[in-house]
Amino acid sequence: MTNKKFSGLRDNFSLLGEKNKVLVANRGEIPIRIFRTAHELSMRTVAIYSHEDRLAMHRLKADESYVIGAENQYTPVGAYLAIDEIINIAKKHNVDFIHPGYGFLSENSEFARKVTESGITWIGPPAAVIDSVGDKVSARNLAAKVNVPTVPGTPGPIDTVEEAKAFVEKHGFPVIIKAAFGGGGRGMRVVREGDDIADAFQRATSEARTAFGNGTCFIERFLDHPKHIEVQLLADNYGNVVHLFERDCSVQRRHQKVVEVAPAKTLPREVRDSILTDAVKLAKEAGYTNAGTAEFLVDNLGRHYFIEINPRIQVEHTITEEITGIDIVAAQIQIAAGASLEDLGLLQDRITYRGFAIQCRITTEDPSKNFQPDTGRLEVYRSAGGNGVRLDGGNAYVGATISPHYDSMLVKCSCSGSTYEIVRRKMLRSLIEFRIRGVKTNIPFLLTLLTHPVFVSGDYWTTFIDDTPQLFQMVSSKNRAQKLLHYLADLAVNGSSIKGQIGLPKLATRPDIPALHDKNGEVINVTNAEPPSGWRKALLEKGPKEFAKQVREFNGCLIMDTTWRDAHQSLLATRLRTYDLAAIAPTTSFALAGAFALECWGGATFDVAMRFLHEDPWERLRTLRKLVPNIPFQMLLRGANGVAYSSLPDNAINHFVKQAKDNGVDIFRVFDSLNDVEQLKVGIEAVKLAGGVVEATMCYSGDMLQPGKKYNLDYYLELSEKIVGLGTHILGIKDMAGTMKPAAAKLLISSLRKKYPDLPIHVHSHDSAGTAVTSMVACAKYGADVVDVAINSMSGLTSQGSINALLASLDGDIETNINAQHVRELDAYWAEMRLLYSCFEADLKGPDPEVYEHEIPGGQLTNLLFQAQQLGLGEKWKETKRAYREANYLLGDIVKVTPTSKVVGDLAQFMVTNKLTSDDVRRLANSLDFPDSVMDFFEGLLGQPYGGFPEPLRTDILKGKRKKMTSRPGLELQPFDIAAIKEDLQNRFGDIDECDVASYNMYPKVYEDFQKIREKYGDLSVLPTKNFLAPPVTGEEIEVTIEQGKTLIIKCQAVGDLNKATGTREVYFELNGELRKIPVVDRSLKVDIVAKPKADTHDPYQIGAPMAGVIVEVKVHKGSLVKKGQPVAVLSAMKMEMVISSPSDGLVKNVTVADGENVDASDLLITLEDPEPPK
């Protein structure tokens, strides 16, 4: 083993003698590309870099690298334009050759001249040739000499807008203003009739000056739908010129090439031959040497027009190399060193091509935001590979920072094969293989582009992208793994942010799925076998009416299990996740096959799923429906409110119920929180319209046996007549607080059975007082067809009565169609769930005998205790219960169920917090700022209470603040424009369906927040609950199945130290064995960070920076009236200028940025407000 360096191995194989040191005056991928060939030629390589590029990959690929100037001496782009400084570096370090790459100084004749004068060999055409062909005006003159056609244009550069206008008057629109020096789409503006030509001219010259150091422009006629064909040329110093065939570069955006193909697929042979001949003719006339490209446009009639010669190597040279097998960079270097084309074996008759090649430029741009360049750190970079795949990249590696100062290209992917179609499919495969996280890329757009019929045919043109809006209907990579890591990292640093969580789960292991056994003791296969037939079969085959009839004819009493909704709402603050419901669903479909229904949806579970669990309630419904096909699903529908807390337009209710029915709900328990029949009717009609089972429900309030109680037997019998008159399939009774005593159950149910002998009766209660099982037994014995219970471990207290206790109480007397052994076996799972969700327990120790006094509903009692603790009223819980009773009587002794129970609870907490008595509330009614829910109730937005509103309290509270509503609220609401809402949501959030619209209609703000969380963290419902609630344990593996057959194995390795400058910590993970590093803001520490506020991308009144850069010009000021699409600012970034337009009409409320100011992506620049405040 010797100490000889690898670079020393090249010394013995040098092809160029002692003069073999090359400097590449460029950055990014092209220096790396050149270095590789130079190393193959046994040359030594030198990189230069700006201070901002000090961590760039290209400097590491060279044998030597040197910074350009001192820190802050040059701008990031200016460093690579510093001619004298670059030459000084080359001379100082004995450089023999300078290769300019493409862009920057590659077409600058002054640079070429000074390089040559300094005694260094210039790899490219001489300065004089660059002058003769390097700008587009000179190129036109050249073409005229050899009779090559050109597009009509100005004979020379133009200096003023007046000259541009004069050309338009002569030749008409459309025209294109082009930078005379440079390329890459910068300094180009197409101007069509009606456009502002003065503004376009100003932008083109400014952008050209910034990018190329020269703002000279010219103007020419713009051809519609042409092809852009370029010919690769090589010329030696002895007058010999050859072509390496053509490339089709028609697929462009902003005049910058996106995808290139070699050779052109659809170019007729005679047109190709003419173009190749003209290209060689032009090069010879110009005395061209080294590599260059002659560019042409081809119109619809096959006529070709010469545009220019690019006196440099092109980005897309790779695909020519792939089809010809010729290393163009090697030829460049050797020609510069004095070799002839013949020396290199490059004679025209020997040059052939084979097959096709396609190059895609993968950029850090977001196609969904008009290709807005993105910046940041590459968190993940996994590239494509395999047969016929070539990658040319620059700073494409994990941890690389994508700078706002330079071009957004990340890597070039070139694929080659025997036919165009083979190459197209190979490119698709390669693009799909890429995994790039941390910044947006254009890969989704490229995938859509390559599968479009026009691209498949090869008949694309230069404005194909602009003319084809369907290209922007992209299928994006979901980035699921990385988003989940961001959630877990935040959990590791900041702990759980789930509201209501106290401590961590007590269950540290994965819950076991219990086995069910048949009567012979054999384990039942619940995974692969079809579940037993259940009541849903009768419903699907016979319809709601016959289903209800069969329920009534059942000889016994059926049960509905509430474990999946009301039980966990009552005990665990509605925090049970889809993950755990889905895990036990197949077992449940067997164990409870004989049940009337599973209550699993609606009510509070709907908004809590989005609000706190960050789950889609519709996806929960669909998932469970698929896993339990045999048992009917019941949901809770709040009449005219849907699942919201106040009335909505009738069409919103109809729309919501239809989606619920279509996605799996069978039975709709429809109620109104005030037993307002008019409100109830809205929900009933919606369910009928959707084809669901109507269970119109009376809300039971208080103790009907109590003398003087207004909600007595007569009240319920009278109410039942109105409800039955509306046409219900089942009559429901909902005892929210568990105040229905056994004697009351006997009296009420027997009376209703006598009154309605053929109508099924379904009773719901809570075990708050400890009497639920006894009361449900009474209901069963005196005529109820269905009663509600919960799995043993999820029963009692504020939940429903125990299912096994009920079964035992009815055993031998009344049939329930339930296997008690299976229920006991199923319960083992739920015992573990109580441990897993222990951090949401309300810590209730036993029944509350005071429930007959305060009448707090079971589900609310748990939530109210949570709220009281969070408001610092935990120690005043007894006082809160007393205040609840007082608040109820202040409101007129109303029926208490969501949302009216919330009104009572809010008023009670308001009274405790402000130390108010009932007399204080009455006396100070007009001066107190009551909670909104209380104001909504008194206004009439929740409906009309039985017996009317308490007066004069209602008048005093509303006086001067709100008007009294006397009719049903929905009658005064304008119908929702469902189609317009859907279009708006699609524009804001992308892939939207009718269920999303229904969610938004119910809870607009909750839905918007849910979408933001999902955009940030992805679908969190796939995480095991322990890992959703508790910080990851270092070294512990987490298995996450994101879809069938795709499992992530995640292991947290470490949490880094605090970065005091940014307030962040880095969390290290292994994801499927690959290291990932996630930065997280530590919210527990106060760090002084100067940062601009960020714009809310979903708020049309907030205008943010589309990317990091410098504000060139602010076009508005506070008080300006702007229209949608009006330019409000100009941003300079990545060597191009971008006009920022207003997303909506509005009045400028605030401008938070000034000319010349640096901004980061999404920084808030301008805030708008309504031009006319609402009256």
Image (cartoon, rainbow, N blue to C red):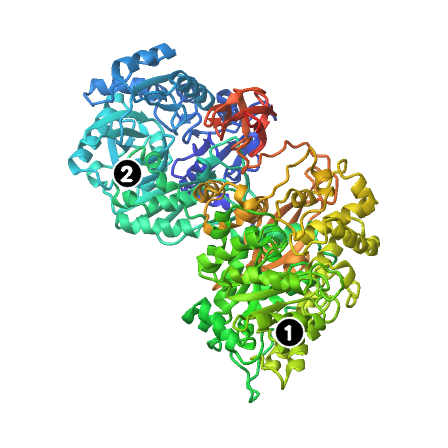
**Residue 95 place in picture, x, y as percent:** 47, 29
Say which residue label 1 marks: 779
Q: Using the rendered view, name the quadrant where residue 711 is placed.
A: bottom right
Number of marks present in the image shown: 2
Q: Using the rendered view, name the quadrant where residue 481 is placed.
A: bottom right
Q: Amino acid at mark 1?
A: Cys
Q: Amino acid at mark 2?
A: Tyr
Task: Classify 10 Å Cα crowding around label 1: few (below 14), some (14-19), many (20 and above).
Answer: many
Q: Using the rendered view, name the quadrant where residue 401 is placed.
A: top right
Instruction: Determine whether 526 is above or below 1083 in the image.
Output: below
Looking at this view, is 498 or 1156 the one in front?
A: 498
Name the residue located 56 percent from the left edge and 62 percent from the top edge.
Answer: 721
Name the residue located 34 percent from the left edge and 40 percent from the top edge.
Answer: 327
Say which residue label 2 marks: 460
Looking at this view, is 690 or 231 the one in front?
A: 690
Q: Which quadrant, please, contains the N terminus?
A: bottom right
- Answer with mark 1 or mark 2, whichever residue precedes in sequence: 2
**Residue 402 place in picture, x, y as percent:** 53, 38
Is residue 1024 at least partly visible in the picture? no
Q: Nearer the viewer, mark 1 or mark 2?
A: 1
On screen, residue 1158 versus residue 741, left or right, reads left
